[in-house]
Amino acid sequence: MTPAAPDAGRGPLARLRVLDLTQFLAGPYATQILGDLGAEVIKVESPEGDMTRRLPPHFVGRESAYYLASNRNKLSLVADLKHPEGQQIVRELALACDVVVENFRPGVLSRLGLDYDSLAAEKPSLVWCSISGFGQDGPYRDRPAYDMIVQAMSGGMSLTGETDGPPVRSGLPVGDLAAGMYGVIGILAAVEESRSTGKGRFVDVAMLDCQVAMLSYQAAYHLASGQVPGRQGRGHDSIPTYRAFTCGDGADVVITANTEKMWRQLCDVLALPDLPQDARFLTNEARYRNRQELWPILEQAFQGRAAADWLDRLLAAEIPAAIVNTLEQSLSDPQVLHRGMVATLDGPNGERLRVAGNPIKLRGAEEPPAGYPPALGQHSEQVLVDALGWDRDRVADLARRGIIRGPAA
């Protein structure tokens, strides 16, 4: 692997240099994970920059909170890929890196002379990860795709929403985030192989593939039975006491009473001591068959107290339970704060933003402070000097001619 620059982030991937040719969410989320783990990530942008820099409604200074949420721990270089010299810069940077990550539509970079095959011929160890909507082949290869498109096409959106309501997009952008995470898994597997054999890989990650993989047991249920599941609503397709209930104060509590012991304890907590002996509810199978009769009984009981009161009683009885938090409640929760899952980003000009933190905790390693996401072109000169060894006069000439740009431009 190529040694990282001296000031690259610390961590297990500190010897990894990554060229980030991505924008929007799936790709930047993947490269942010690599940056969080210590990789040196060089984000290459057009003169207009990643479009999420301008995405409303919330901004810190001139940058959108959307952009800031997925681009920490990176360097930014602006190169004009419409110009042959800009294309050559990116080509040389790719050869100076261990990993290239891009999320262009299939074929776009090849038309610019930036393709895995020609680069791998010069650097066989190169790992290239392409994240796209539908992958590098197949009948939908050239279709555009965004998060909600693949949520819809995968069938996942058909499972989301109230049982008698319309399909609903997941409140989390799972199409983008899953593709980013699967991309990182593929990259790290290919890097490990490259370190062993000297031969890299082309990692082809399709957002739709990732969403189909995440159908998990729901896909298996359908393929085994032929039945088409509908909206899952507030519960679970197999366990009738794995469900949300509205309490007396209007807040919702979720319970996951998965075992017979938990079922009996739940009835005790709800002051329904005769329910476990009811023939309709003797076993989980019976409760499942009669769930439409069971749920109103449980819902009426939960109306008797506030959610926080129920939570204390349920946890004391060792029944897994939680209140359905708002984001305000979640991001101030003592467990979330204790685990460092709200990180503070401090910018060079006094900017400050709190964001969701890095969930990968490495025992015995101190997590370095998160690097503030870069301004557009902030590191153009630094990257070309440090990564490619170019002299500053050459870099200045490129800047004068608009091939590269720094933050002032």
Image: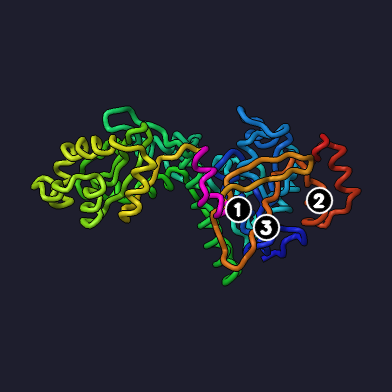
Q: Which residues are magenta?
A: 328-340
- Looking at the rendered structure, which numbered label has been put on residue 86? none
User: From the image, which quarter does the N terminus lie in?
Assistant: bottom right
Residue under label 1: 116
Look at discs 2 and 3 and give the one toward the viewer. Answer: 3
Q: Residue drawn at (35%, 37%), measured in percent from left and top?
A: 306
Q: Amino acid at mark 2?
A: Gln
User: Tag count in the figure?
Assistant: 3
Q: Say which label, 3 or 1, has the lower sequence index.
A: 1
- Looking at the rendered structure, which numbered label has been put on residue 368? 3
Q: Say which label, 2 or 3, has the lower sequence index.
A: 3
| Disc 1 element | helix
Question: Is residue 208 found inside the magenta-colored segment of the image?
Answer: no
User: From the image, which quarter does the C terminus lie in?
Assistant: top right
| Tag 2 near tag 3, CB within 8 Å | no
Residue under label 2: 382
CA separation, marks 2 and 3? 22 Å
The image quarter containing residue 259 is bottom left
Q: Residue drawn at (68%, 64%), measured in percent from left and top?
A: 15
| Tag 3 near tag 1, CB within 8 Å | no
CA separation, marks 3 and 1? 33 Å
Q: Amino acid at mark 3?
A: Pro
Q: Position of residue 269 (x, y in %)?
A: 26, 48
Q: Relative to the observer, which residue lies in front, 230 or 190? A: 230
Residue furthest to the left: 279
Look at discs 3 and 1 and give the one toward the viewer. Answer: 3
Q: Amino acid at mark 1?
A: Tyr
Q: Residue drawn at (89%, 50%), measured in percent from left and top?
A: 392
Question: Is residue 331 found inside the magenta-colored segment of the image?
Answer: yes
Q: Main secondary structure of the magenta part?
A: helix
